[in-house]
Amino acid sequence: MDAAEITVENVMNKEVVTVDVSATINEAAKIMEDAKIGSIVVMEYNVPIGIVTDRDFAIRVASHAYPITDPVKKIMSSPLITIGTSESVWKIADLMNARRIRRLAVVKNKELVGIVTATDLVRQFATATEEDMIKMYHKSVIKVYKTYSPYH
C-alpha cells in the first residue's frame, strides 16, 4: 500500500478497553493492569468522554494524593481528542504533535471503534520503504509550504 494512502483504519487497534465514568481509580488501574495496556477510555452513557493513561496515574494520582476510591473522572483527560477512520496517518501525526498527546480515540458515526497510539505510527513508519519515506518527506514539505507561504 502506498504510504500516502494509509489511513487511521489501517493502523488503529480495534480492541479498545473502556470503563464507565462511575468506576473508581483503583478499578480502572486493575483493568489496565489485567489487559496490559497503557490507557483506558472513559465512557458515559456509551459515549466516550475522556481517557486515563498510565501517566495520569503516575502524575495526577500521586501529586494530588487522590484516594484510589475516588471516581476515575477525577483523573481523566477530557474532552477526549478523537479522529475519524478515513483520516491519513499524516493527520494522526499532526494532531498528536499539535495536542502533545500519544493516543487518539477513533470514532465512526460518533461511535468509538478503535484507538491509535504513537507506537502504532512508529510501527507503521518502521516498515516503510525508502520510497515511502521520500513521499512522506515531500508531503511534509508541501504542507509546510502551504501553511507558511505568502504565495499560497
Image (cartoon, rainbow, N blue to C red):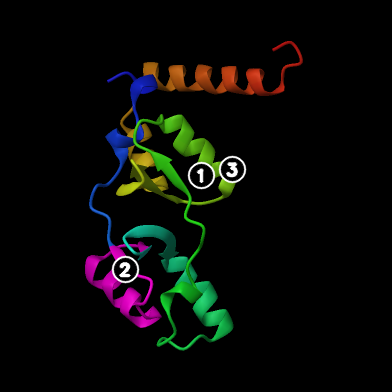
Nearer-N-terminus badge (3/2): 2
In percent of width and height, residue 146 lies at 64, 18
- 120 inside magenta stretch: no
Spatial CA span between label 1 and label 3: 6 Å
Circle 2 — which element? Answer: strand
Left or right of residue 74, residue 122 in this image: left
The vertical placement of 47 against 117, above or below, is: below
The residue that label 3 is drawn on is 98
In percent of width and height, residue 110 lies at 36, 45
The residue that label 1 is drawn on is 96
Circle 1 — which element? Answer: helix
Left or right of residue 90, residue 64 in this image: right
The three-letter amino acid code for the residue at tag 2 is Val
The three-letter amino acid code for the residue at tag 3 is Ala
Most foreground residue, 101 or 108: 108
Most foreground residue, 152 or 145: 152
- Screen quadrant of the C terminus: top right
In percent of width and height, residue 101 lies at 51, 51
Q: Residue at x 37, y 33 (%)?
A: 125
Q: Residue at x 51, y 61 (%)?
A: 78
- Residue 129 seen anywhere in this rendered image of the structure: no
Residues rendered magenta in the picture: 18-42
Question: Mark 2 or 1, which is nearer the eye?
Answer: 2
Left or right of residue 11, residue 142 in this image: right
Most foreground residue, 142 or 112: 112
Left or right of residue 11, residue 147 in this image: right
Residue furthest top as drawn: 151
Residue furthest front as drawn: 45
The three-letter amino acid code for the residue at tag 1 is Met
The residue that label 2 is drawn on is 19
